Amino acid sequence: MTNVGFIGLGAMGAPMAWNLDDAGFDLVVYNRTTDREQPFAEAGVSVADSPKHLTERVDVVCLIVSDGDAVQAVLERDLGILAGLDEETTVVQMSTIGYAETMAAAELVEEAGARFVDAPVSGTVGPAREGTLVGLASGPEGVVEEVRPVLEAMCDPVVHCGEVGQGTNMKLFINLLLGDAMGAFAEALVFGKANGLGVDDMLEVVENGALDCPLFEGKGALIADRDFDPRFPVDYQHKDLSLALDRAGDLGVPLSQTAAAREAFSAARGSGHGSEDMGAVIKPLEAVTDVTVEDD
Amino acid sequence: MTNVGFIGLGAMGAPMAWNLDDAGFDLVVYNRTTDREQPFAEAGVSVADSPKHLTERVDVVCLIVSDGDAVQAVLERDLGILAGLDEETTVVQMSTIGYAETMAAAELVEEAGARFVDAPVSGTVGPAREGTLVGLASGPEGVVEEVRPVLEAMCDPVVHCGEVGQGTNMKLFINLLLGDAMGAFAEALVFGKANGLGVDDMLEVVENGALDCPLFEGKGALIADRDFDPRFPVDYQHKDLSLALDRAGDLGVPLSQTAAAREAFSAARGSGHGSEDMGAVIKPLEAVTDVTVEDD
Amino acid sequence: MTNVGFIGLGAMGAPMAWNLDDAGFDLVVYNRTTDREQPFAEAGVSVADSPKHLTERVDVVCLIVSDGDAVQAVLERDLGILAGLDEETTVVQMSTIGYAETMAAAELVEEAGARFVDAPVSGTVGPAREGTLVGLASGPEGVVEEVRPVLEAMCDPVVHCGEVGQGTNMKLFINLLLGDAMGAFAEALVFGKANGLGVDDMLEVVENGALDCPLFEGKGALIADRDFDPRFPVDYQHKDLSLALDRAGDLGVPLSQTAAAREAFSAARGSGHGSEDMGAVIKPLEAVTDVTVEDD
Amino acid sequence: MTNVGFIGLGAMGAPMAWNLDDAGFDLVVYNRTTDREQPFAEAGVSVADSPKHLTERVDVVCLIVSDGDAVQAVLERDLGILAGLDEETTVVQMSTIGYAETMAAAELVEEAGARFVDAPVSGTVGPAREGTLVGLASGPEGVVEEVRPVLEAMCDPVVHCGEVGQGTNMKLFINLLLGDAMGAFAEALVFGKANGLGVDDMLEVVENGALDCPLFEGKGALIADRDFDPRFPVDYQHKDLSLALDRAGDLGVPLSQTAAAREAFSAARGSGHGSEDMGAVIKPLEAVTDVTVEDD
């Protein structure tokens, strides 16, 4: 049995760690604030007092924290992961961070003689609980295969996307498409409402056709209910579209729809909805058109 | 049992008529060219020699022809539907035509003392065969309910969208969203490929996430196979997006993503791919970026 | 000396007719409502009681009315131009109308044995008064040269754009560019204001650089003064951009910036500013960003 | 008389320094490579062997180098400006750099007890020679006024844009508008050409109307001549639009036309024209439409 460490017990990380525990791995957890560790301690899971000490006790270190700066801190600070690494350790970085940040983290880990897997996940808290996140794993074939059982405790499927960095690129790819789809859905709903169509009717038509998908079903119901509590907020979607457009600009790939989508999320930020759920991208459109997409 | 007439035995109309026959309706068919009537005659279905004579023999006349001009011709010519109408007849117009054309057809039918249902369908040949088209019915509640059994022989579900004209508007709504989604998918795939991601990997990630839907599954596989045989060609999608944008402009609803999508389809037309399947919207993007989204 | 008839004494037409009078042409005028004819009558200019009678008395008939329907009416009604034409007459159509309408008008005139020049003008009331409109003349070389002295009394320069229809296309070209430039200017001004820049400073920088032009100088001052009295209203600019995009779509020319500009004008319409000056395209942007571009 | 130092004798900097010399300032120059200093030495202008030694000899240090990294190097390296500063010195930073870089440079200079003016310029080599650059000066009123005579030797006008950072923001504002205008011009020209209009005719119409400006006159002639030698290359314009969109995104200002323009420049990069003049933004549009905008 593999010893697995898990760092970052937030909204996503905690259910992922529980899934590792359920799968029978010998688990050690760590979180920057101890309150998030408490339920694990109570359930008999080992808790480490620093990333360094966690790393010293396991073969595989999984890591999911808020952003690139947090990844850097967990790796590099005095009692950080790097301080506890040896050649047997594999670091599985699962946070959503930029491409350059991923490459920098990989370099640090590999310079320390250990192995690095870039493995962000696609999905929200629901799939995190159910173990059905899409794992976007990248790194050398052999290393990814070794940690596959660990990933499969949290993800289904696990897609091997290529060498280190490609998991991060795949995350940009899917979030670009999500942002575009959300923005287009908002335009379509406002268009339909301005034409006098009923919201329920529009959603029924979408759900019975070629675009039947969880995003439109879920966000359609939330918008109709005027529920904009943040699952994935406008600000995050705006940031991901910006990262994708920056990278596309570097590569000379013109993305005019995606660019229009980004500006729609920018409008939502400008009008004060940045911290609401991504469905709030519809609000500036509603304001200019003077309609509200809500249950009839 | 209701006597039902069906006019227009094309790629969509023929399987729809067979479904009416299978459902046990007393069916009379008509097509402008007699070769399409032949299989029906051989199976014992009545064939009329004109829309007028068909109309005289039935209670409900279903109609699905190529465009607004064809609808007008079938209604108004010497042996057209109008010549055979009486007050007991309901005309169910299922072709995809413009809003103004729908309203004009309704006026002609109602002036003749008969009843009109605006009922375009969403879906392609597959759902037409399986009877799972989405029926976008509109007209007075009572009239739509009377013909519902007829529609349900061809469609599942049948959505009552409101008064006459709203079925047509709903068709614009869903085709707007389809066009936007197709254009966004093309951008995402070219972005991913330019980053070195594998096509199969991208499709697997899409199919296991919040955007899992028949459109992306179907068009993704076709693009990867470089199969651009027309199911729904670029020219048609371009036309539907243009109709939607015209109507949005009339209403003052700004649709910047949809506008960008329309220009992407315009680029596909300009570079000679107008008669290929809508997936060919990816080709100008591939050309400018010098990548091809195909199986690895 | 040429006898010249002038039909349409509106805001543009009246100063154009005065310029013909000043240039010494033997002038006959006609307007649908007689109040606009009064000043001409008082100044000793001949007034005709119908387009037919005007046409019978002159060699060249100039025509500038509100839209394609008005052109058709002036040509075709009982006492219309067509009723008075002979083979010596040249009709110079100067209204801004669609390409198909231009071609239809040309056909009617030429079927009647007379000659047709398509000559819309670019410019507003100021240049109309000063005789510095840009004349966008098209038609057979010889015919255009014959009427050039007439056009030069109203326009400077007169550009011969090609065969009939190309004057109309040139008008679309220049109005497309005007709409794009206006929309871009609005974006830049809101961007600058949101950054805390002064409006006067921004205008000074524009006027001293590579973009120094009458449009930015004029509209910049009006926006800063919050003066949105219609010179060229949002609705007209929206219509011209729509015409250009329709034609571009037919030709397969993708115009993504122009498409974005059209949606910006659409937003201005949707938020109730359609009849204000085109500078009001800035208002929805200001609303979403919560800034006002006005004198400091 | 003020002693003035000038660092950075490139294509822009050299003529700017000559104008300072012509205006009678007691000038000291420095360039990283000595070949650019040679003409100044031959003309009797003092040459310093480091930014430090230059700074020690003057009251005002003007600086125009390639980018933010170069500014940082000139300030901070061993024999850099900071090493030579005293409380009497004013540093006038004229390079085009990012907002954060400007603020960082200002902080370094002010921490050293000296004064900082943020003063990028708008204009190309021609205005640099003629002393008609637009000076976008920002900083405390008194400090800007003190160095105004120095700026006026190189610029006409000098616009005081506000506190430090606003000069940099004004540069983004004007380059955003330039990029949008260039992209729109490209769309209009391809649209016109696809309609069969002559390039010379289009340019004549533009130059006689509300959009008559140096940009369209200059770039129009270059495009017609197929001259894409870099004055201001596609890559630079792409970068400036990206900087502006990033800042707009931070502020929640949606800029959909500007976003479309950026993607047009991205397409030019993707198809291999990044180092050509910004007019090459027209090339991907020409390719997709199969027309060439060139002299007839």
Image: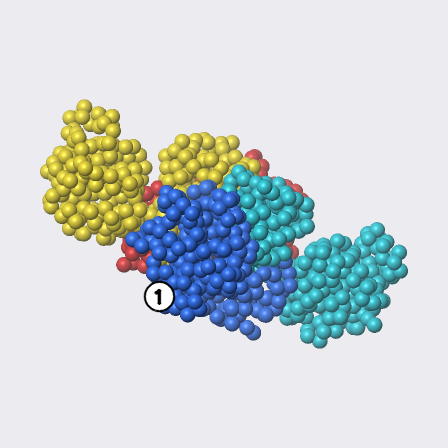
Chain colours: A cyan, B blue, C yellow, D red
Q: Residue at x 43, y 32 (%)?
A: C228
Residue B135 in view in this figure = yes
Numbered disc 1: secondary structure:
helix
Q: Nearer the viewer, residue B159 or D100?
A: B159
Q: Nearer the viewer, residue B91 or C268?
A: B91
- The quadrant in which the N terminus of chain A is found is bottom right
Q: Nearer the viewer, residue A55 or C285?
A: C285
Amino acid type for the residue under numbered disc 1? Thr
**Residue D113: % across, % down:** 65, 42
**Residue C19: % across, % down:** 21, 34
Residue identified by numbered label 1: B34
Residue C244 falls left or right of residue A200: left
Number of numbered discs: 1
Work out whether C136 lies above or below A66. above
Give the class, few, some or many, for how many residues have Cα within 10 Å of label 1's Cα (few <14, many ≥20).
few
Q: Quadrant of residue B41 in the image?
A: bottom left
**Residue C144: % across, % down:** 18, 48
Chain to which the residue tagged by mark 1 belongs: B
Q: Residue at x 69, y 65 (%)?
A: A135
Residue C261 falls left or right of residue B213: left
Work out whether C39 lies above or below B180. above
Residue C212 falls left or right of residue A176: left
Q: Residue at x 57, y 46 (%)?
A: A199
Work out whether C126 lies above or below D126. above
Check the image and name the residue furthest to the front: B1
Q: Residue at x 78, y 68 (%)?
A: A60
Q: Quadrant of residue A19 in the image?
A: bottom right
Work out whether A147 lies above or below B12. below
**Residue A98: % across, % down:** 65, 59
